[in-house]
Image (cartoon, grey):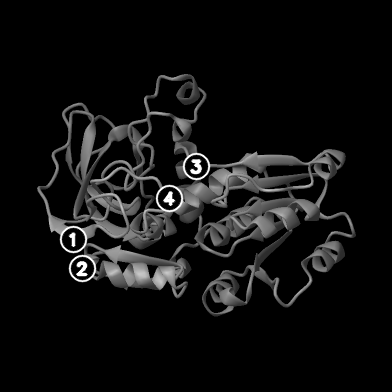
Amino acid sequence: MKALIKTAKGQGNISLENVPVPKPGKNQVLIEIQAAGVCGTDIHIYYDRFANSPPFILGHEFSGVIVETGNDVKEFKVGDRIVAANNPFACNSCRICSLGFPNLCSHKKAMGIHSNGCFAEYAVLPENLIHRIPDGVSFEEACLTEPLAVAVHSVSRCGIEIGDCVVVFGPGAIGLLASQVAKAEGAEKVILVGTSNDIAVRFKCAHALGIETLNIDEENLPERIHAVSNGYGSDVVIEASGSKKAIAQGLDLLRKNGRMAISGITGENQIAINWDKMVAKAVSLFFAYSSVNRDWEKSLNLLAQKKVRTLPLITHRFEIEQWKKAFEVLEQQAAIRPIFVLKKTV
């Protein structure tokens, strides 16, 4: 089968190769990949800016069909349309796993980063990570369940209350999805914040999704929030940009006893915030990393109920042989989510 492989540490070292189709173990399923999303993490792995463990097959966002099951697989059958959570090799027995957070397990080896991923014609994964795609949800819609689950996890960490005013920093895939999730959860006002660089592609997508945007290069964000919140400030801030400036401004925008969900990675060891001011405002900070099975279940329900849309985020479609072009358009921010179409039936 064809597979896109990170062959060694260092910049580049990625090649499309022919490798054997894997065989499922007793608790595993063999999946024929239908569509796979290209994420910013894949770009960081190309440049070796993100910790990874080569050699491995890249990719962690996908949809597919089960074509073979191991002898002990009970819940799934050949022909099932599926997606899979990205927590391979979590031990399911340590204290963190027992608390329900396999995404934080020290033994976890995320697919496409520390174990084989989905930029291939086939993949093998354990049964406990698999989720059925609901009827009425296409393979292309479902192939972005992973970033949707990350957005759901982040929003769920801080919680949305009916009538909340929510500010979302970062109009990439996670920000666009988190904005939709916040609205689905009952937020009255959701404002997605970006810069002039986001107007052509990301803001255009946001407007197609009915999401209000603000260009921080041209508009005064504190004034807008002051006006829409009757001077109280934002109930919730969702930080998905990884920008130090956005983090600082987001904290300032929070009302007293406000809540902030943080999933953006800054790349810095430390950042400066006004700690005493946050204490005086009694704000709550919720850091969020990856996702767990319940986030996937909720994500698929949101897709089935048409409360969240993923298709508008798919701006480019490529064959896997065009991987360099897919990486290029994402790196240049000409795309939100390019996908590889592995099968023409998607």
**On the image, numbered disc 2 is attached to which residue?**
321
Name the quadrant containing residue 252.
bottom right
Q: CA distance from mark 3 to mark 2?
A: 32 Å
Q: Is the C-beta separation of discs 2 and 4 under 8 Å?
A: no
Q: Which residue is mark 4?
A: 146
Q: Earlier in the sequence, mark 3 or mark 4?
A: 4
Give the Cα separation between the discs numbered 1 and 3.
Answer: 32 Å
Residue 7 percent coordinates (x, y) = 22, 51
Q: Looking at the image, is mark 2 or mark 4 earlier in the sequence?
A: 4
User: CA–CA distance between discs 1 and 2?
Assistant: 7 Å
Q: Earlier in the sequence, mark 1 or mark 2?
A: 1
Task: Decide which of tag 1 and tag 3 comes sooner along the chain.
Answer: 1
Which image quarter: residue 138? bottom left
Q: How many marks?
A: 4
For the residues carrying marks 1 and 2, which lies nearer the camera in this image?
1
Nearer the observer: mark 1 or 4; the answer is: 1
Q: Which mark is residue 16?
A: 1
Q: Which sits in the foreground, 88 or 330? A: 330
Which quadrant of the figure contains the N terminus? bottom left
Q: Which residue is mark 3?
A: 295
